[in-house]
Image (cartoon, rainbow, N blue to C red):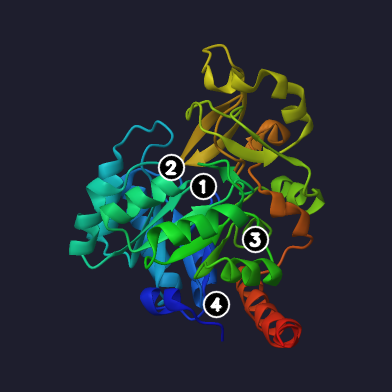
Amino acid sequence: MLRTRLCELLGIEVPILGAPLGMIAGPELAAAVSNAGGLGIMSFNGNPPPVLREEIRRLRRLTDRPFGVNVLLDGPRLPFATDDLVSVCIEERVPLLSFFWGDPTPYVARAHAAGITVIDQVGSVAAAERSVRAGVDVVIAQGAEAGGHVAGQVATSVLVPRVVDAVSPTPVVAAGGIADARGLVAALALGAEGVVLGTRLLATPEARAHPAYKQRVLDAGEEETVRTILFGYGWPNAPHRVLRTAFVAEWLAEDARGSEERADEPVVGELQLGGQVVPLPRFAAFPPNADASGDIESMAMLAGQSVGLVREIKPAGAIVRELVAGARDIIRRQLAGTVA
């Protein structure tokens, strides 16, 4: 096994977390990561509180290991309050509550009072310091290479050691650009106590991504992503990294168009959200999940630069086990002989 302080804190076997990929990471993906010894984190996936409650209970039926639920604090505009989502997580006594895109301060004490561990994902040293002042247990430092919504502009290799130095002894987890054993070992060398896998987990049977989206991930190279605010309809001016599809290339010159939320934007498709069919206007912030229909190529195919390392679909559990075995091999065989 490969263990760090993070494993002891979270009650897991290996220092690998599954990213709460919005609309993609449901109970199946989170459970698969947890059952392999890591910590799967389920996104709230835009669901209203009653549906989120059912998803949490479904996740519990799929694993008896620790898991997490992610809530966006200042994310897309939805017809229910963030506080209601947090309340559901607390009432359901989830083992871990994960926050992103906002100030976790109002929620940390409530979660701790219920015995829940709190993680916050940040993109800067200043945000990490705020998280620690709020009392979070773990900080995720997300580098600019990451897919999906990206809070900062600094590369993982620089951000992680800066955050480690700033918030020690709070454990730091690295996110962004990590898809194989080499990335795991590199993150540990930077001072991280573990890593988050995001883009790599898109190419799994458990991911709720549309088949065309998964194929795009398999076909793309590391230079075929772009950081943009194009898909800002419903979540304006929030930078995100997506695959550079023909649609993205066509509209990239009008980067801010998606955040204007024009009433005349055409509907390009539909997806299931909270058990209901929801129309997707052009430039909507949601990626195409397995239930999406319509012009899939014009939807937000969120992915990070590590997409260039993803070449096949594998079960999430197998990916976790391969990363750990590969990291141990690198440390034992390749690094052991490099120090005199």
Residue placed under numbered mark 4 in the picture: 36
- Mark 1, residues whose alpha carbon is within 10 Å: few (<14), some, or many (≥20)? many
Asked whether residue 100 is in view, the answer is no
Earlier sequence position, callout 4 versus callout 3:
4
Earlier sequence position, callout 4 versus callout 2:
4
Number of the front mark, 4 or 2: 4
Residue 178, label in figure: 3
Asked whether residue 101 is in view, the answer is yes
Residue 340 % position (x, y): 72, 88
Q: Is residue 6 above or below residue 160?
A: below
Number of the front mark, 3 or 2: 3
Q: Tell me if label 1 and label 2 are in contact, CB under 8 Å.
A: yes
* Disc 1 to disc 3, C-alpha distance: 18 Å
Residue 110 % position (x, y): 20, 56
The residue depicted at 40 percent of the width and 31 percent of the height is 77
Q: In the rendered view, does 18 fall on the left or right side of 327? A: left
The residue depicted at 42 percent of the width and 37 percent of the height is 75
Residue 154, label in figure: none
Residue placed under numbered mark 1 in the picture: 22
Query: In the depicted view, which residue is nearer to us: 46 or 186?
Result: 186
Q: Tell me if label 1 and label 4 are in contact, CB under 8 Å.
A: no
Residue placed under numbered mark 2 in the picture: 46
Earlier sequence position, callout 1 versus callout 2:
1
Earlier sequence position, callout 3 versus callout 2:
2
Image quarter where the N terminus lies is bottom right
Residue 318 % position (x, y): 65, 75
